[in-house]
Amino acid sequence: MASCNYDGPIILMLSYLHAFHAGNFADVQKHATLYLALTRMQAKASPIACFDTHAGSAVYDLKGERALKTGESDRGIQRLWQNRAGLQSDDWQGFMAELETWNGVIPELRHYPGSPAWMATLSRDQDLVAAFELHSTEGLRLEAWAEGRKLKVRRENGLAGLLHSLPPSAPRLLALMDPSYEIRKDYQEVAETLVKAWRKCRHGVFLIWYPILPDRLHRKLLEALVNSPVTKVLQSELSLVTPPDRGMRGSGMLVVNPPWGLGDRLEAMMAEVGGPEGLNASHRLDWLVPE
Ligand SMILES: C[S@@+](CC[C@H](N)C(=O)[O-])C[C@H]1O[C@@H](n2cnc3c(N)ncnc32)[C@H](O)[C@@H]1O
C-alpha cells in the first residue's frame, strides 16, 4: 500500500493489486463499516443506489500466491475468523455469517469478498449496485464475477463516474471511495470529488477509506474536508500497536451522514477485536466535522 510522488496519468500507474492486501486489518475496518452502513440503511425499505468507485476484483483467494506472499490476512480477518466464537456483537455475528456463506465452516478462510461483493450480496431486490474499476485485469475479473449477478460493472474512472451518476436514480445513496493512494494526488481528488458529490446529493452516505502512512499525507484529505462545506463527517481510525517501520501504521474511514446507530456499533465492533488476539490495534471514533 505504498504512496509515491507521481502526479502523471493514472493509466500508467495502475500497478496496485488488492490480492496482496485482501483481508488485512484495514479491510476489516473498511468492510465492517460498509457492512454496518448498508445494513443500517436497509432498516428502511426505500431503495438505495450503491456505488463502489474503486472496486478491485470482487473476491480474493487468501490461500493464493499473492495473499500468502504478504501474509496480511493472517494478522487481519483470519485471526478474527479463528476467534469468532468469542465475538459477542450481533454485527460481528452477521459479518461472520456472511463469510461463512462464502467459505462454509472451515478452520481458515479461503475466499474473502471485496467491497463490490459485499455490496452485491447484501443488496436487496430494490437496491442498485454499480462498481467502477480501471485496472484492465482487475476489471475483467470483476466483470466475470458480476455475470449473472446484480452488479453493474463500469470499467472507467470511478470518481468521474460517480459524479456523472448523481443525483442517483434511487431515493438514497451509499458511495464507497477506496483508492489505493498510489498516486499522491488521490488524496486531493477524493476530497474534491466528495465535495462535488455531496453538493449533488447532500443526504448521501459517503464512505472514504484512507491509509495512515509514515508520510501522513492523509492529513491533506482531512484538512480539505474540514475546510469544505461538508458536515456530519464521522472519523474512525485504527492504529496498530506495533506498526511496521515501513507501510501502513493504521487506517481510517470517514463516514459522511452516518446512518443512525452506525457510530456506536462501529465503536463496539472495533473494541471487540482490538486486542493482541485480534487486530492488535487501538481505535478512535469522533466527528471530524460535526453537524
Ligand atoms: C484498494 S483497491 C480496492 C479494494 C476494494 N474497494 C475492496 O475493498 O475490496 C483500489 C482499486 O481501485 C482501482 N483504481 C485505481 N484508480 C481508479 C480509478 N480512478 N477509477 C476506478 N478504479 C481505480 C485499482 O486498480 C484497484 O483495483
Image (spheres, grey):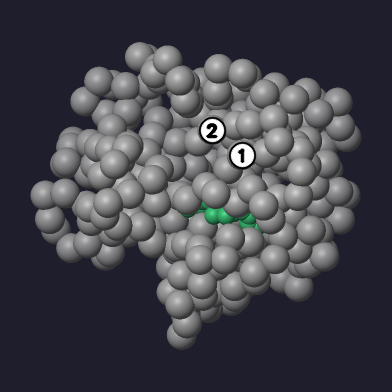
Residue 168 drawn at (x, y percent) = 76, 67
Cα–Cα gap, marks 1 and 2: 6 Å
Residue 232 drawn at (x, y percent) = 73, 35
| Above or below: residue 93 compared with residue 60 | above
Which residue is the site of mark 2? 2
Q: Quadrant of residue 260?
A: top right
Look at the numbered disc 1 and say if its residue's Cβ is closer than 8 Å to ligand 1: yes
**Does the rendering let one see residue 143?**
yes
44, 243: nearer the viewer: 243
State which tag comes first along the sequence, 1 or 2.
Answer: 2
Please name the amino acid that badge 1 sits on: Glu
Residue 29 drawn at (x, y percent) = 45, 37
Residue found at the very far bottom of the displayed protein: 148
| Above or below: residue 93 compared with residue 3 | below
Q: SS at mark 1?
A: loop
What residue sits 76% from the left and 38% below the top? 7
260, 147: nearer the viewer: 147
Circles 1 and 2 in contact, beta carbons < 8 Å:
yes
Number of the label disc, if any, that sits on residue 259: none
In the image, taking residue 284 as reference, residue 65 lies left or right, namely: left
What residue sits 27% from the left and 51% below the top? 65
